Image (cartoon, grey):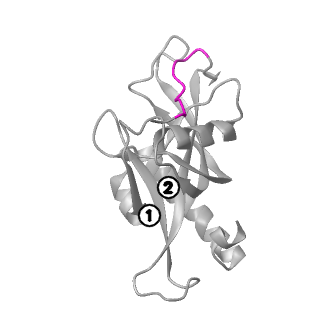
Amino acid sequence: MCDLVARTGRHQQRYEAGCRLVAGCIPFRHRNSEGSEDANIGKIVEVLMINSTSGPGLLFPKGGWENDETVQEAAVREAIEEAGVRGELMDFLGYHQFKSKTHQDEFCPEGLCKAAMFALFVKEELESWPEMNTRKRTWLTVPEAVDSCRHSWMRDALENGFSKWYAERMMTAGEDISAEH
């Protein structure tokens, strides 16, 4: 049984200019490529996706940003609640707007949402987490994840947010991101 409990309800939900504010992350890790003996050569970046509870396709953990937390705290919370991972929240990847079909309410009747997405370097996969009975985790390479994204805005966050950020980090750092942490 999981000691953590997922937040529910909308009474603490943040809104801005008719949009529901959402926080999420793209969890990632490094894996050695097949046949590579050298720990610094042949690293493959993988991202963690979870199944949708409302249809086919995979998602990144995300959810409502609430009044009693920072956007960074909300992103970390969602990673724990939905995907059962903990790690280091690294950098802001950008805002992405989308229309939710399932989260329309009196403050946001159109279902408009604005998601702040972050990169999360995964350091721990929990054995139990709040949504483990409804969510399954899947590690994918970036190209596999692009093909598996349920929503175009998440695909954009991966391709134009995470992938560009990661490439820039690798160029400026000249080494594996995980070595810094």
Compare residues 7 and 61 and report the one nearer the observer: 7
Q: How many numbered tags mark residues here?
A: 2
Disc 1 and disc 2 in contact, CB within 8 angstroms? yes
Write down the quadrant of residue 65 in the picture.
Answer: top right
Judge left or right: residue 96 versus residue 104. right
The residue range painted magenta reads: 3-11
Q: Which quarter of the rendered picture does the N terminus lie within?
A: top left
With respect to residue 39, does 13 lie above or below?
above
Which residue extends farthest left?
56
How much space separates mark 1 and mark 2, taking CA atoms? 8 Å
Examine the image and state in which quarter residue 4 appears.
top right
Q: Is residue 16 visible?
A: no
Q: Which mark is residue 142?
A: 1
Q: Position of residue 109 (x, y in %)?
A: 48, 15
Secondary structure of residue under mark 1: helix
* Kind of residue at disc 1: Val
Can you name the residue that lies furthest to the front here?
Answer: 1
